[in-house]
């Protein structure tokens, strides 16, 4: 059924140089990148805080090493250091090949504090971008909706950091989206308190064998990062039919800098279209239920969890994969593992290609050669068929099996920084973002401490 909405006059909230849709992992840094480049910038965010998956959704592990040295710089690195100053990082050795564990609440405060110091930068919370205002193929404005009603916002350039490429959908751009049953599963994260982390660590160190895909990184002073199944603990135990899935279910949990606190990431909600609100609602209900199914088993069968409780669940389901831009270059496992270089690179990056199998039962990892890094070209961020908008974050152009690397949070932040700089350049020069000359792009980004790996002849694409 269709309802035809009557045309109406609505107020204009403001006119900016750069507007960022979505103030999550990439978007919060995009706002800083644009504002520090001199652009009057607005970040529009549907939740009541900045940071998306990195803060309120309670992820607490990032990677930023090429297995030899740190390969993330710029505002992302500045932000990590700010979180560290607040005592929010468990193991701050950024050169080391490890998951860096952090506290998402300190991360939320750190970004709020960084925003407060910026002159050109505004953030508008609890606001959805719901529609694009087009002039031909050029995005000129967006419609926003919040408690104040419906308003329009205009800008010279837009950055789509919604994760789901909402702006591309609204502007009529073609995008890539796999069938839900072929996408990486979504997960709701929970914060578990009152875990005896030392006891847990002793248990895992003594545990005789790791099963397929299991890993235990217990080398950290107080804690670790664990990926495991409950099959061994549940051997010989009779379970109700609806809990049988838990024997073989892949569960991740990792510690935070807060005593007795662990993050549980296990719900693997499969075949979910992250852009379908009704499907996401049902997926969220199921994930909350699963959380409460697994906790009693943890308490009974995993030493250290005896007195643990669920302190909080994330405000929404975390979606790993949905719509992605169709630009001039699509990154693949091959381009990543071969450390491919491009003349229009915005940065270089390395992190494992973590592939969450669509059935939710496993995560496989492919690793790059230590010390190498692949380029992310501007053309994988700029849609081919719409002007005035660039994508940054997990929505860039990349094949599904490879997006586990490009969507890593440190990379999303770097892409946000780069997109902010590029959008500010285009706004100032009255040009399109795809028109920034390669040498200008690299010079400005290098000046801002963005990491570029040196190209060698074998990995450079000649164009
Ligand atoms: C459960 C889970 C665990 C993960 N674990 C890790 C990990 O340990 N380490 C790691 O590096 N990566 C991890 N990832 C991947 C990583 O978190 C994401 O790929 C990354 O955070 C995506 O960044 P983003 O900016 O694209 O999206 P997000 O951080 O999700 O930001 C998108 C923002 O846009 C807002 N938004 C969306 N639509 C609109 C709209 N229409 N209007 C206004 N605002 C809107 C959202 O509220 C959100 O704040 C995990 C992902 C998930 C789902």
Image (spheres, rainbow, N blue to C red):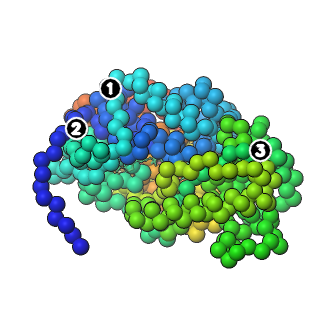
Q: Which residue is mark 3?
A: 197
Q: Residues within 10 Å of mark 1 (few under 14, many from 20)?
A: some
**Which residue: 31% across, 35% down?**
42
Q: Earlier in the sequence, mark 1 or mark 3?
A: 1
* In this rendering, position of residue 220 left or right of residue 35: right
Q: Position of residue 432 (x, y in %)?
A: 25, 41
Q: Position of residue 428 (x, y in %)?
A: 25, 30
Which residue is at a point 26% across and 42% down the rendered structure image? 148
Instruction: Identify the mark at residue 25; answer none if there is no mark.
Output: none
**Which element type, helix, strand or loop, lies under badge 3?**
helix
Q: Label 1: state its secondary structure.
A: loop
Is residue 279 at least partly visible in the picture?
Answer: yes
N-terminal label among 2 and 1: 2
Q: Secondary structure at mark 2?
A: strand
**Mark 2 burial class by Cα count in 10 Å: few <14, some 14-19, many 20+:** few
Residue 263 image offset from top left, x and y in percent: 64, 48
- Disc 2 vs disc 3: Cβ atoms closer than 8 Å? no
Q: Is mark 3 within 8 Å of ligand 1?
A: no
Q: Toward which corner of the image does residue 360 lie, by quadrant? A: bottom right
> Is 329 situated left or right of 267 in this image?
left
**Mark on residue 120?**
1
């Amino acid at each position: 059924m269709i309802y035809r909405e009557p045309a109406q006059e609505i107020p204009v909230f403001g006119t900016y140089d750069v507007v960022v849709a979505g103030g999550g992992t990439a978007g919060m840094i995009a706002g800083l990148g644009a504002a520090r480049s001199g652009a009057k910038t607005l970040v529009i965010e549907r939740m009541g805080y900045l940071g998306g998956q990195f803060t309120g959704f309670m992820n607490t592990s990032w990677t930023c090493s090429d297995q030899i040295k740190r390969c993330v710089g710029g505002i992302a690195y500045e932000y990590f250091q700010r979180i560290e100053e607040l005592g929010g990082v468990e193991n701050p050795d950024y050169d080391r090949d490890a998951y860096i564990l952090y506290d998402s609440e300190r991360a939320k405060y750190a970004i709020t504090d960084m925003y407060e110091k910026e002159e050109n930068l505004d953030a508008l919370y609890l606001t959805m971008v719901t529609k694009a205002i087009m002039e031909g193929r050029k995005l000129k404005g967006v419609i926003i909706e919040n408690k104040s009603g419906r308003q329009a916002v205009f800008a010279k350039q837009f950055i789509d950091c919604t994760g789901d490429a909402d702006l591309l959908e609204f502007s009529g751009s073609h995008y890539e989206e796999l069938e839900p049953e072929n996408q990486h599963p979504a997960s709701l994260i929970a914060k578990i308190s009152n875990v005896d982390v030392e006891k847990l660590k002793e248990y895992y160190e003594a545990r005789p064998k790791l099963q397929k895909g299991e890993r235990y990184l217990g080398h950290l002073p107080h804690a670790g990062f664990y990926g495991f199944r409950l099959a061994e603990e549940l051997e010989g135990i009779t379970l109700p039919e609806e809990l049988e899935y838990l024997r073989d279910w892949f569960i991740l949990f990792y510690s935070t800098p807060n005593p007795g606190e662990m993050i549980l990431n296990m719900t693997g909600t499969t075949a979910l279209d992250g852009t379908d609100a009704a499907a996401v609602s049902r997926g969220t209900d199921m994930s909350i239920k699963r959380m409460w199914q697994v906790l009693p088993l943890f308490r009974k069968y995993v030493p250290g969890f005896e007195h643990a409780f669920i302190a909080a669940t994330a405000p929404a389901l975390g979606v790993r994969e949905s719509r992605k831009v169709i630009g001039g270059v699509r990154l693949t496992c091959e381009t990543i593992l071969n450390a491919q270089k491009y003349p229009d690179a915005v940065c270089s990056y390395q992190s494992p290609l973590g592939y969450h199998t669509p059935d939710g039962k496993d995560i496989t990892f492919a690793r790059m050669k230590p010390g190498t890094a692949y380029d992310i070209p501007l053309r994988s961020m700029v849609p081919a068929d719409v002007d005035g908008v660039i994508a940054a974050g997990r929505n860039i152009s990349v094949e599904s099996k490879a997006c586990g690397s490009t969507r890593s949070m440190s990379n999303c932040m770097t892409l946000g920084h780069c997109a902010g700089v590029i959008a500010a350049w285009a706004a100032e020069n009255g040009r399109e973002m795809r028109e920034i000359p390669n040498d200008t792009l690299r010079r400005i980004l290098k000046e801002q401490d963005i990491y570029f790996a040196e190209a060698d002849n074998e990995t450079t694409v000649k164009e």
